[in-house]
Amino acid sequence: MSTDDENRFRPKPGRIRSDAPRGGKTRSFLSQAKKIARQQRSGASGVAFGAAAFMPAVPAGSRAVLSSGKGVKRGRGAVFVRSRNLGAGGWQHRQPGARRVIVKQRYVVNAGKSRKAHTHLNYIQRDGTSRDGERGQLYSATEDRADGNAFLERGEDDRHQFRFIVSPEDGAELSDLTAYTRDLMSRVEGDLGTRLDWVAVNHYNTGHPHVHVIVRGRDDQGQDLVINGDYIVHGIRERASELATLELGPVTEIEQTRKLTAEIDQDRFTRIDRAMAEEADARILDLRHEPGNLRRQFERSLRLRRLSRLGRMGLATEHAAGVWELNERLEPTLRELGERGDIIRTMQRSLAADGLERDPMTFRIHEGAPAAPVTGRVLDKYLANELGDNLTVVVDGIDGRTHHIANIDPMQLEDVRIGGIVEVGRAEVTARPSDRTIAAIAEGGVYRPSRHLEQAKFEGRVPGGDYEGYVDAHVRRLESLRRAGIAERIDADQWRIPEDFESRAASYDAGRTRQASVRVLSAFDLEKQIGADGVTWLDRRMIQGEAADLASSGFGQQVRDAMDRRREHHIEQGDATRQRDGRIFYRRNLLASLREREVARVGAEMAESKGLPFRAAADGETVKGKFTGTVQLSSGKFAVVEQSHEFTLVPWRPVIDRQLGRQVSGIVQGGSVSWQWERQRGLGL
């Protein structure tokens, strides 16, 4: 035998065997490795009682133990990230005894170029968020009362903006949340190697006090601020956890036991659930053997008590004593329950703020626009996602129900006040121009792209001359309608469309959109409407005789009572009379008279402050002047049009908002105005 043969090693793999017990289930190598890792972690010396097993191995939405490796070499904070990658301990906020802090973040592009940034800043300072229930106070690193408008102006041209929510689990125990935030941002600046321009607001309107921080997307050199991705996800949370632990001390065994025990009966996804989901093998959890370690015994007891609760909820099944199977929908179901519970508590707080109480069985939660229009009083409006821009509104409906309607464009709620009356429904969707073109080109219910192409080339009205692309866009529209069962493809050059093609296509679009449309019926609450000298929502309902949709309880009954009091007010003012048989007759043209009366009163009051005489515009008159602003009356919203020697008030329409400060012209007709715009005059060459 040669020396080479003696040193040569030739492995011969045999048949793959299973090391599982007879009749048992084979455990994958990954499952076995994860189990050994958990055992080593839980058996480490110096770990607080029950802390290791229920500390999340990774933050929600991440599976990396250290950093993800994404962007480790670029962006400010990369040095900090690499130091955690090379170290053996990983991120410090995951260590036993560290105080838990939740940090949510969002990266917003071109935030300063839209009104959404302004809206977001206003809503995080809304009423009821401070410790004493007043309006939230904006502060910065050096100012206790920061100027939000100045901050937005500085960031108007920034490429992006960072938004953070920092929520310490024990935030209520921190002595000063403002000082905590300033210390946190100071450490973040040290990690990033640059000064940051930021503002923040403390919120105490939830069970856990938290902080909203907005950071400009520029560093102290005026360059775009690029922050390492792993630092945003992990680094800020480590610094926040580090500061909370420094002030309050490490979490003791008693605290950890109390917090975990409190999670047993909660209807949300808890740390106990996360630990069980990670430990389960193919959703099977075997807890038959009681460990000798006291800490492990406590953890087993927590799991069994939580599993009993999940079993009653239908989210876990016990196959044998101590052997449980977790439902595949465990996490999403519990997260949905947690979100629903948060919404219900928010609705109850909104009602309690007005001294109201409603049966939770009457609560209706809408993810988007409600299927049927909802009319009622606005109890609250707030950010649906406190890092985002869309709003949520809570409406006390005339149908006797309380409605929670989410994901509304903030521009829709710009004129909506708490206590005002609104109607929320689906956005009106009209037929698309492409649908009208298809219907016009079709002959005998058949649309031919080849004929459409010929006609487009003959008319020559397609911008850029891309006739093929123009016709292809119509074909793509038909393809989407074919999947909806509205159009039928006969062959490559023939499409069959129904007679009601346009209406069916519009209905299809309306069913797909979830965007709500908000119409302000009255900017004033019921009490102010009762004694108002202008036209109110109550007046319109009384004149039209609408009362069938009013519930006999809740806000519906309050509206009935307010309408009765409004009738008595009209009788006292001589605008209505009661006959012997109880019937009530209103004066002729009551609504127009009330509108003219209120406009005359408000115009006279404004004339004193403006130093200009007021003149009411007559019906059919052409009004010309400079549009200088708006005023909200009980009769509606009115535009202020000024001339050099006088001013007038005319009904407002949304289309006029873009003409603020410009010369406008319009014809007053029947309580409305048909607006026209005059060209701006200026110097030319």
Image: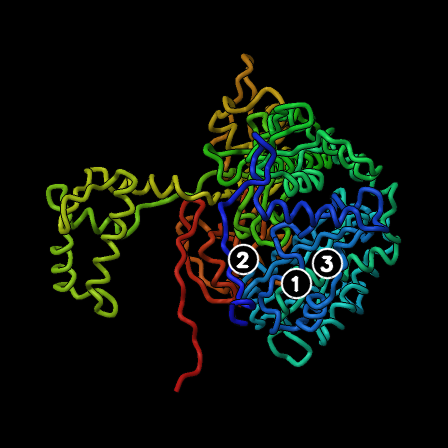
Residue 37 in the image: x percent, y percent? 69, 50
Q: Nearer the viewer, residue 35 or 360?
A: 35
Is residue 303 something that shows in the picture? yes
Residue corresponding to mark 3: 237
Secondary structure found at label 2:
strand
Question: How far apart are the alpha carbons under marks 3 and 1?
Answer: 8 Å
Residue 142: x and y in percent read: 80, 69
Q: Earlier in the sequence, mark 3 or mark 1?
A: 1
> Which amino acid, by three-letter code, is at mark 2?
Val
Rendered residue at 22%/41% (across/down): 487
Q: Which element carries disc 3, helix, strand or loop?
A: helix
- Circle 3 residues within 10 Å: few <14, some 14–19, many ≥20: many
Indicate left or right for 366 with 349 as reference: left
- Answer with left or right where residue 348 lies relative to residue 510: right
Between the residue at mark 1 and the residue at mark 2, the CA separation in whole angstroms equals 48 Å
Marks 3/1 in contact by CB < 8 Å: the verdict is no
The image's mark for residue 640 is: 2
- SS for callout 1: helix
x, y percent for residue 409: 52, 50
The disc placed on residue 232 is 1
Of residues 663 and 148, which is closer to you in this image? 148
**What x and y, as percent, mark residue 96?**
80, 51
The amino acid pointed to by label 1 is Ile
